[in-house]
Amino acid sequence: MIRKKRAVRMICGILAFYLIVCGTGCRTESQRTLHLYNWTYYTPDSVIRAFEQKYGVKVVYDDFASNEDMFAKLMAGSKGYDLVVPSADYVSIMMKLNMLESIDRTKIPNLRYLSKEVLDRTVYDEGLGFSVPYYMGAAGIAVNKQAVPQYGRDWHIFERSDLTGRMTMMDDMREVLGSALAVLGYDLNTADTEALERAYRLIQERWKPHLVKFDSDGFAKSFASGDFAVVHGYAEAVFAELSEEQAQHVDFFIPKGIPSALYIDSLCIPKGAPHPELAHTFINFLLEPEIYALFLDTFGFPASIHTEAGAYTKRKPHYTLDDMKDCVLKKDLGADLEIYTDYWQRIRFTP
């Protein structure tokens, strides 16, 4: 009788252990987490919630303000991200450094919706072996029309002494140096030292004296609060901080006639990502036309990479594809990146 009771207790114990292990395994599987590392103001909550609900997973979203910040963090050994969103030039850099997992195109059937316009520009990763375009756009200039009733819609606005102390430009060497090079008639990807020297002097002598600072992080909040009247930056960041009333008095433009910097931000799976399958699932989900339309509407973007999503959008974009027709893609500078870095350090830290 005692043996029988012991046997029953043993069986119950084994069953309990099995249930605990099974239950834990089931919970772990149902509570999978996708770790996304993306730009600030760049991932709609609506898209994240829809993905979490459809696949029974959780998304953890960390953000960064520049490619340099993202790259430095990953190079410093930060692990655990399933998806990162570098721009084209940094996709190229990270590919060369073997920092990315390859993309399995068979797991992303919605690649069929990518536009020819964006595919023709992805020369940095032909065949999309390591990246999938997330968005193609350009930075621009936002002007508070109540504070600045008269102005030209070009880069020369940063030369205005009457606006000294009321303007900022991005803390981004490729954007700022590229803009100066373009104003002077040079290729914004050039490594010619004479061209870069002239661009440096333009920034240092004609733009910088009128700026509060170079800022890629808090410029949108400061613009919305009225601290700044003119800011160089991304439309999605600016308008995310404005009320509907405020937005009516803001002009955002990409200067025309000059090849401003174009960016293609791409979804990439970093080397050693814990959930590459889930990363592929998220990429495919994002490219569903109705889902990508949510992304476009959230930030007021045109359908620059997607052939079908534009038909599902409900908002007028802050700028159009035509506004970007003169823009030139920022390319990987290779070893010449050091030249840009040197000039940028001089700009940032020389009075």
Image (spheres, rainbow, N blue to C red):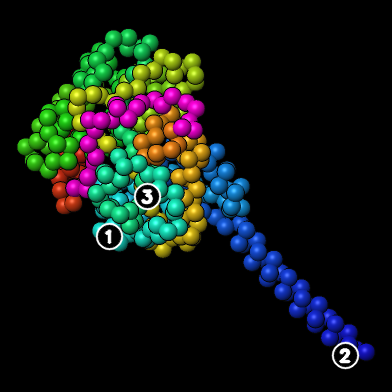
Residue 103 locus on image (x, y percent): 38, 58
Give the amino acid at mark 2.
Arg
> For residue 345, what is the image quadrant?
top left
- Name the secondary structure under disc 1: loop
- Do the residues under discs 2 and 1 have CB atoms within 8 angstroms? no
Classed neighbour count for the residue bearing mark 2: other residues with Cα under 10 Å, few (<14), some (14–19), many (≥20): few
Give the amino acid at mark 1.
Leu
Q: Is residue 20 left or right of residue 90?
A: right
The tag on residue 3 is 2
Residue 292 locus on image (x, y percent): 47, 39
Tell which tag, 3 or 2, sits nearer the viewer.
3
Q: Which residue is mark 3?
A: 132
Residue 256 lies in magenta, yes or no?
A: no
Is residue 94 something that shows in the picture?
no
Q: Which residue is mark 1?
A: 97
- Name the secondary structure under disc 2: helix
Q: Earlier in the sequence, mark 2 or mark 1?
A: 2
Instruction: Give, as a single range, the part of the protein colored magenta.
Output: 311-333
Residue 321 lies in magenta, yes or no?
A: yes
> For residue 120, what is the image quadrant?
top left
Give the amino acid at mark 3.
Val
